[in-house]
């Protein structure tokens, strides 16, 4: 190991095949930030500065602002930095100076009814972002770089920051229409993760959802939908910017048609709007409302029957209420609930006299 550099020695003792590229990338990010090119230069710089840890804290902010990483991803890139300096005998004192890594919000699995409710109650900005997130299952940093011109083109290539993988994005007519409306209204989507998170958190509160829809969940939903449809692993990996053999990636990027057909099938299985099932019946939110009305009518129906019977036992009454009392019991739950409210209101008026 005498002819190895400090960086090579450090990397040689890292055994994980997935860990080594991550550690290499983290160290090279720091070199880029500090304007140095070797591990030896990093060590020299650290030994020459009394408060080198301040540089690492600034590096954490730089990763988010310049590389578009989330706070969690930026923090994970500090781990290889700590590992390198510890290996070199110059451990960094970073305890309590940087936020801890936090677990991903994956314990909540939103249903399509949740998504449809959020979409239906959201403003044009929320709708546009949700539609784009459904179409392009990329990471937040890559999503924020997508331009209106790319959306309008319908198809474009994106090179993911984290994986360094080039993938093709397809845009639905729904998303293109929403972005045109944004442009016409001169509305600009937030251009930072914090801005998007704030927008979606507010939309989730309005929709009454228990948690904010974490951006990472879109990729989970996309992959789950693909798996449920029996789409091959290679296809959904290409569509979600995951690593596949180069020749396979090249084939699908050049061929295009087959890839788009699979994308259309997957996104069709992720409806953001309530749809009719073709038989005049509705699904999701409207169906939920119908079921609620039916259940409530079953609860209040005995009360309505009792009130009608009481009125009839009294010999009936003249006027609008009297005519109402002689009508047959409604068969439609909504009409039954209207009758319940009228009878209840009539009873309250009589008590008030």
Image: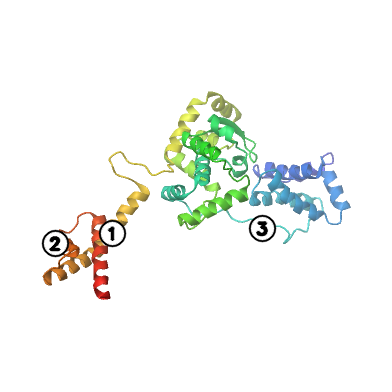
Q: Nearer the viewer, residue 274 or 344?
A: 344
**Classed neighbour count for the residue bearing mark 2: other residues with Cα under 10 Å, few (<14), some (14–19), many (≥20):** few
Left or right placement of residue 270 versus residue 91 in this view: left
Answer with the quarter of the image where residue 144 lies: top right
Tell me the residue that label 3 is attached to.
100
In the rendered image of this protein, does residue 257 appear above or below residue 351? Answer: above
**Classed neighbour count for the residue bearing mark 1: other residues with Cα under 10 Å, few (<14), some (14–19), many (≥20):** few
Q: Can I make out residue 136 in this image?
A: no
| Residue 326 disc label | 2
In the rendered image of this protein, does residue 94 appear above or below residue 128? Answer: below
Left or right placement of residue 119 versus residue 276 in this view: right
Tell me the quarter of the image containing the C terminus: bottom left
Answer with the quarter of the image where residue 303 lies: bottom left
Query: Residue reaching furthest top?
Result: 255
Task: Please provide percent x and percent y for residue 210.
Answer: 48, 58
Tell me the quarter of the image containing the N terminus: top right
Q: Cβ–Cβ below 8 Å for labels 1 and 2?
A: no
* SS label for mark 2: helix
* SS label for mark 1: helix
In the rendered image of this protein, does residue 163 appear above or below residue 352? Answer: above
Left or right placement of residue 77 versus residue 332 in this view: right
Q: Which mark is first along the chain, 1 or 3?
A: 3
| Residue 295 disc label | 1
Q: Which mark is first along the chain, 2 or 1?
A: 1
Kindly report the distance in space between the C-alpha atoms of the residues bearing marks 3 and 1.
48 Å
Q: Residue at x 74, y 43 (%)?
A: 29
Left or right placement of residue 98 versus residue 194 in this view: right
Q: Nearer the viewer, residue 352 or 299?
A: 352
* SS label for mark 3: loop
């Amino acid at each position: 190991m005498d002819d190895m550099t400090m960086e090579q020695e450090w990397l040689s003792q890292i055994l994980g095949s997935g860990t080594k590229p991550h550690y290499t990338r983290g160290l090279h990010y720091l070199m880029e930030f500090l304007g140095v090119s070797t591990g030896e230069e990093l060590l020299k710089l650290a030994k020459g500065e009394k408060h080198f840890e301040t540089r690492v804290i600034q590096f954490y902010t730089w990763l988010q602002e310049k590389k578009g990483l989330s706070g969690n991803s930026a923090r994970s890139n500090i781990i290889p930095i700590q590992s390198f300096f510890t290996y070199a005998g110059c451990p960094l004192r970073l305890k309590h100076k940087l936020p801890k890594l936090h677990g991903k919000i994956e314990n909540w699995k939103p249903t399509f009814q949740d998504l449809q409710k959020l979409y239906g109650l959201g403003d044009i900005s929320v709708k546009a972002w949700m539609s784009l997130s459904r179409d392009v299952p990329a990471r937040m940093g890559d999503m924020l770089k997508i331009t209106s011109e790319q959306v309008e083109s319908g198809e474009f290539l994106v090179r993911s920051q984290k994986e360094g993988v080039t993938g093709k994005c397809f845009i639905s007519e729904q998303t293109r229409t929403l972005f045109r409306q944004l442009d016409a209204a001169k509305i600009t989507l937030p251009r930072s993760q914090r801005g998007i998170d704030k927008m979606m958190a507010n939309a989730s509160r309005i929709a009454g959802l228990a948690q904010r829809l974490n951006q990472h969940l879109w990729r989970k939903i996309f992959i789950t939908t693909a798996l449920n449809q029996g789409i091959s692993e290679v296809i959904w990996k290409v569509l979600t910017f995951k690593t596949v053999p180069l020749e396979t990636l090249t084939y699908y990027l050049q061929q295009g048609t087959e890839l788009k057909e699979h994308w259309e099938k997957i996104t069709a299985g992720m409806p953001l709007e309530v749809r009719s099932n073709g038989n005049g019946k509705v699904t999701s939110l409207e169906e939920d409302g119908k079921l609620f009305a039916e259940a409530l009518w079953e609860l209040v129906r005995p009360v309505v029957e009792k009130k009608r019977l009481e009125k009839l036992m009294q010999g009936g009454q003249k006027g609008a209420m009297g005519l109402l009392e002689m009508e047959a019991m409604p068969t439609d739950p909504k009409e039954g609930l209207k009758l319940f409210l009228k009878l209840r209101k009539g009873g309250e008026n009589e008590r008030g006299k």
